[in-house]
Amino acid sequence: MTQSPPLSEPTRAVRKVHKPSLGDRLAEQIPRLVVSPTMLIAVVFIYGFMIWTVVLSFSTSRILPRYEFIGWQNYQRLFGNERWMVALTNLGIYGVLFVVICLAIGLLLAILLDQKIRAEGFLRTVYLYPMALSFIVTGTVWKWLLNPSVGIQRFGRELGFENFRFDWLVSSDMSIYTVVIAAVWQSSGFVMALFLAGLRGVDDSIIKAAQIDGASRITVYTRIIIPSLRPVFFSAIIMLAHIAIKSFDLALALTGGGPGYSSDLPAIFMYQFSFTRGQMGVGAASAVIMLMGVMAILIPYLYSELRVKKDDR
């Protein structure tokens, strides 16, 4: 039997399996090691506390957590509470007006800046600046402006309009609208930026073709440009609705939920019942209802985004 010739040195080198060194394996694991603490913190302090809040909503917890299960009693007490129903009504008023007015003002400002006017950069900065402020600062500033003793009402009367009244801040029927005013002032610039980015992304060739066919500027916007902004509208509505449901610091700084509880919002109700009135179970139930509202908004949005990405593939 003949023996096969010995392998040459290059052939042996090819057959050698490369074993990664300790440094190579460590380099591969560095991204996971960097992300792991953040993921752990997110799981514990976000999702862990969400689950804990749900558990508390079914318990007898008052000043301190207690884990005696009482079923749906906290939810029955919650929806039997007049103050909670006022908070939900206020959220409906505030949420609808906040979203609609922000969309209208944001779109108008974006269309204005899209005309390639002078000082566009300066105006864009001015419109966006309120978004850089915290809601606490915004609430405090508007509280001064809307205070009948020192704000707009006093200024109007000093100009000679003795019968001028703008006392919404101290009116039980109108106080919730002061929260709308402050929130719209702060968020309209952000919506403007979204719409402006959408306007700059519209294909110019379609617009030029419509203009060649004799379409007026209004027709171009109403028939071509604005319909093409549907994804921007959807994203803006989702973001604004999310902000509205979680609104807390702005209303707390501006009205404190008053006069009485006439401008209460669910977040203020949750805070006061959980931490100042010693009814943690009811407060946790209100927090769960707010969480469900946020999820009802975000889940369809995430589903649509994932479906679009899947279709693009």
Image: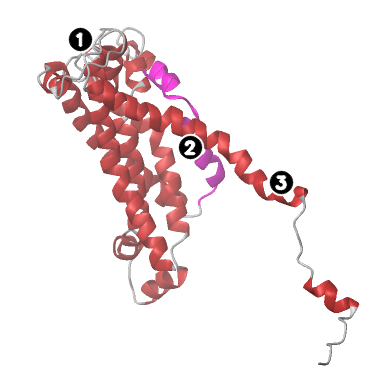
Of badges 2 and 1, nearer the viewer stands 1
Image check: 19 left or right of 167?
right
Residue found at x 33% / y 74%: 214
- What's the image's color scheme? secondary structure
Residue 170, given in percent of the width and then of the height, sits at: 23, 11
Which numbered disc flags the more N-terminal residue, 2 or 1? 2
Q: Amino acid at mark 3?
A: Leu
Is 185 within the magenta?
no
> In the drawing, what numbered circle is on residue 260?
1
Question: Relative to 6, is 53 on the left or the right?
Answer: left
Residue 77 appears in which quarter of the rendering? top left
Q: Which image quarter holds the C terminus?
A: bottom left
Dividing the picture into quarters, in which one does residue 136 lie?
top left
Mark 3 vs 1, N-terminal side: 3
Where residue 235 sits in the image (x, y, percent)?
Answer: 36, 49
Q: Residues within 10 Å of mark 1 (few under 14, many from 20)?
A: few
Q: Which residue is mark 2?
A: 128
Q: Which residue is mark 3?
A: 26
Q: Is 7 above or below relative to 50?
A: below
**Residue sitting at x 40%, y 45%:** 109
Q: Are marks 3 and 2 in contact (CB under 8 Å)?
A: no
The stretch in magenta equals 117-142
